[in-house]
Amino acid sequence: MYKIAICDDDKRYRKIIREIVKHENSLPEHEIRFYEYESGNEFLKHMDILYELVFIDIRMPGMDGNQTALKLRNYNKDAVLISCSSYFEPTVDSINFGQPFRYIMKDLHNTSLRREISAIMAEVNRRFLNDYAVTVTAAGKITRIHVENILYQKGG
């Protein structure tokens, strides 16, 4: 199951993202679960979910997208992060905060998102299609440990 979070204060844009992802068709629709949040604070209340793909609006009331992305990375370093904005304001912070895979401009016909969606979904597939991992919860943090990073030492 692919878990996709959309954190944007614009309900209409959340619906647009959902529809474009569904129509991209690189993932079976029954394998996708969407989670929608209106604010960074609301999103961060659900950090127990390890999302594979996260769309975050840069400008939101309260905690902005950059701050939200930084906090996301404390819990989930593997998610494919997409920063979205209606304003052309890529700064060092908006590019470096949370290490987004793409910075999407919200435009009238969603051209930027439509142009980038296949690359975004290809990256999700690359990172997670054959992702064999163990999820560990310790000290209030959830960590995904990839099987290839687990070392086994035979006792002697």
Image: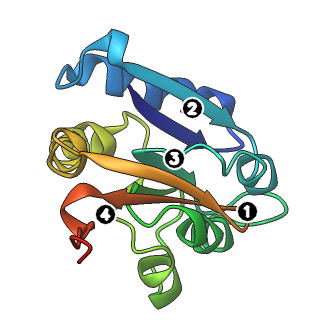
Name the mark on residue 123: none
Quick one: SS at disc 2?
helix
Task: Point out residue 127 in the picture as x, y percentages from the top left corner.
Answer: 22, 52
Foreground label between 3 and 1: 1
**Cα–Cα span, label 4 and label 2:** 19 Å
Q: Along the line of sight, which residue is nearer the eye, 115 or 37?
A: 37
Q: Along the line of sight, which residue is nearer the eye, 4 or 58?
A: 4
Name the mark on residue 50: 3
Query: Which residue ends up furthest to the right in the rendered image?
Result: 62
Residue named by callout 4: 101
Task: Point out residue 14 in the picture as x, y percentages from the top left corner.
Answer: 57, 32
**Cα–Cα span, label 2 and label 3:** 19 Å
Residue 106 appears anywhere in the view: no
Residue named by callout 2: 14
Q: Earlier in the sequence, mark 3 or mark 1?
A: 3
Q: Quadrant of the N terminus?
A: top left
- Kindly indicate whether the residue at mark 1 contacts the one at mark 3 (C-beta within 8 angstroms): no
Residue named by callout 1: 140
